[in-house]
């Protein structure tokens, strides 16, 4: 008979409990040894948190750029091959280029989502270790730079824009409306030749304007970056929804800018009618709508008291019913108003004439309000009506008063913006008293209305007035039509040629409005916090 070895006999003779303890201790020792080896080969700190921002998954045909977007926090776990890279707390990394051309090099980086990622936002491609290492090593050169000092780099044809920073750009806490304009050599999002729907009056290059730098200045908020407009992301965020631009000709200007940007990725179908313009994007069932409403409030031309027929009567306490019945069908509404309060009209409150603009037949009757006060009341009226509509649940974006830049007079008294070719520098800005007081009344009306919201809609102020006060270069000026014989220079006595210093060239500064609109929508639909004003 073969006897068991002394060692086997000894273990077998021990109680089962003691045997289990011995095995556990041995396993723990092996684990500690193995863990120590791993820590030596791949130090703690090899984890880099990144945000990917860019112009969108796919091709931006206007600039021939392939870019990728993942606007959610990702964790990039650096493998042992990059074991010398360490991420220190507080490191700020500049935008760097990540190649998409060499799939064979992409092997060892694991990308893990640590935040909510929609099915259309997740980026499945991995990153080469050498590129991650390069990004982290280069970060030390900008650790002491402020956001204003760190410019946005131009995108090459095969790169994404990488921004590693705090959550400012994605948290909704960043103030979008204070910052600086800078020249972006990557150029505009489209050209006048790649958009067939822009109004001729805004086609500045087509109308012979000789300079074009105004097309390429971009807005940089002081605390974060405002991403380039990503047309595919916009269409995905708005899938099955309708965006309506409602208001005056500046609303048309902004709507056409939106269409021009989206046109670069998909040609929409025109499904408009006499009541409203409507463009339909089949891939995502998105509708872009525009409805004309000069003042956004109820108007009539019938005689009233001492105001005869033919003069427009504005009922300052009633909304424009021309679009209010359509309101429940809109998911996002962008409002534009203010400039028509400089035109002839009669102001009515409680069916009583209380003032007028460019019309007042009896000086013995005192005016109770002027056009500035009337504008403030109108803002309160329309926003309150929208915020209390029982069937409206959408997002209302109030784009603040768009500054004009007539110098030396008003639009009808010889004002001019001829020859302006760059944004005004900070010390050069000349305050426009009328713009300032109209903006003040608009903000006041907004603040009153927001206290009265009782439905499930949301109200946001898109406060662009100050930022765009610097963009006197962005108007058509004398380049309002393609007539080769039009006057573009001052006359012999300094008189300016006929010109437009209110609307905006396309492409041009107006495109920034829609970049801000997209950012507001993103914050709302992706659940990040935002303020109401």
Image: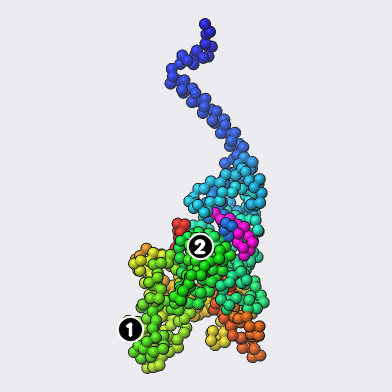
On screen, residue 51 above or below 429: above
On screen, residue 274 above or below 171: below
Report x, y in % for residue 433.
Answer: 50, 80
Q: Is residue 154 left or right of residue 271?
A: right
Quarter of the picture containing the C terminus is bottom left
Q: Is residue 104 magenta?
A: no
On screen, residue 419 above or below 24: below
Sequence-first disc among 1 and 2: 2
Report x, y in % for residue 63.
Answer: 63, 63
Assign a secondary structure to mark 2. Answer: loop
Report x, y in % for residue 55.
Answer: 58, 60
Q: CA distance from mark 1 to mark 2?
A: 46 Å
**Range drawn in magenta:** 59-70
Q: Residue at x 62, y 57 (%)?
A: 66
- Name the quadrant containing residue 423: bottom right
Q: Residue at x 36, y 78 (%)?
A: 317
Q: Nearer the viewer, residue 111 or 494?
A: 111
Say which mark, if any, is on residue 282.
2
Q: Is residue 61 magenta?
A: yes
Q: Residue at x 47, y 81 (%)?
A: 340
Give the residue pinned by disc 1.
Answer: 351
Report x, y in % for residue 269.
Answer: 52, 67
- In this rendering, the count of numbered labels is 2
Say which mark, if any, is on residue 135.
none
On screen, residue 255 above or below 371: above
Q: Nearer the viewer, residue 460 or 438?
A: 460
- Name the quadrant containing residue 145: bottom right
């Amino acid at each position: 008979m073969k006897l068991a070895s002394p060692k086997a006999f000894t273990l077998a003779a021990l109680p089962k409990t003691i045997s289990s303890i011995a095995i556990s201790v041995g396993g723990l020792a092996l684990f500690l040894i193995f863990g120590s080896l791993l820590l030596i080969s791949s130090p703690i700190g090899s984890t880099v948190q990144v945000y990917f921002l860019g112009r969108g998954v796919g091709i931006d045909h206007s600039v021939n750029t392939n870019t990728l977007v993942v606007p959610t926090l990702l964790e990039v776990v650096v493998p042992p091959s990059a074991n010398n890279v360490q991420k220190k707390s507080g490191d700020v990394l500049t935008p760097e280029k990540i190649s998409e051309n060499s799939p064979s090099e992409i092997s060892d980086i694991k990308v893990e989502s640590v935040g909510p990622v929609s099915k259309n936002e997740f980026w499945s491609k991995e990153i080469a270790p050498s590129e991650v290492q390069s990004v982290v090593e280069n970060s030390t050169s900008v650790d002491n730079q402020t956001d204003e000092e760190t410019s946005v780099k131009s995108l090459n044809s095969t790169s994404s824009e990488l921004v590693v920073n705090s959550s400012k750009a994605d948290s909704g806490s960043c103030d979008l409306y204070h910052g600086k304009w800078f020249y972006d050599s990557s150029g505009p999002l489209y050209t006048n030749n790649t958009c067939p729907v822009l109004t001729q009056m805004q086609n500045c290059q087509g109308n012979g304007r000789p300079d074009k730098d105004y097309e390429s200045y971009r807005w940089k908020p002081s605390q974060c970056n405002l991403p380039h407009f990503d047309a595919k992301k916009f269409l995905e965020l708005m899938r099955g929804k309708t965006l309506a631009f409602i208001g005056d000709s500046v609303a048309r200007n902004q709507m056409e800018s939106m269409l021009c940007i989206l046109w670069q990725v998909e040609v929409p179908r025109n499904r408009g009618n006499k009541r409203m313009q409507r463009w339909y994007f089949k891939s995502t069932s998105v509708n872009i709508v525009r409805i004309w409403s000069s003042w956004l409030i109820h108007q009539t031309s019938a005689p009233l008291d001492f105001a005869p027929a033919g003069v427009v009567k504005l009922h300052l306490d009633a909304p424009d019913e021309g679009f209010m019945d359509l309101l429940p069908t809109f998911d996002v509404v962008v409002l534009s108003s203010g400039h028509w309060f400089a035109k002839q009209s009669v102001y009515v409150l409680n069916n009583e004439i209380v003032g007028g603009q460019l019309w007042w037949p009896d000086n013995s009757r005192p005016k109770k309000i002027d056009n500035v006060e009337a504008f403030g009341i109108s803002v309160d009226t329309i926003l309150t009506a929208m915020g209390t509509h029982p069937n409206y649940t959408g997002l209302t974006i109030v784009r603040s008063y768009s500054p004009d830049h007539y110098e030396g007079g008003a639009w009808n008294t010889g004002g001019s913006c001829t020859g302006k070719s760059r944004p005004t520098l900070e010390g050069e800005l000349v305050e426009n008293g009328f713009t300032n007081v109209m903006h003040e009344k608009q903000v006041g009306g907004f603040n009153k209305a927001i206290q009265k919201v009782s439905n499930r809609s949301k109200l946001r102020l898109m406060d662009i007035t100050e930022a765009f006060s610097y963009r006197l270069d962005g108007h058509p000026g004398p380049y309002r039509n393609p007539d080769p014989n039009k006057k573009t220079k001052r006359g012999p006595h300094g008189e300016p040629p006929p010109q437009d210093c209110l609307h905006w060239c396309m492409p041009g500064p107006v495109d920034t409005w829609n970049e801000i609109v997209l950012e507001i929508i993103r914050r709302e639909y992706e659940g990040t916090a935002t303020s109401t004003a």
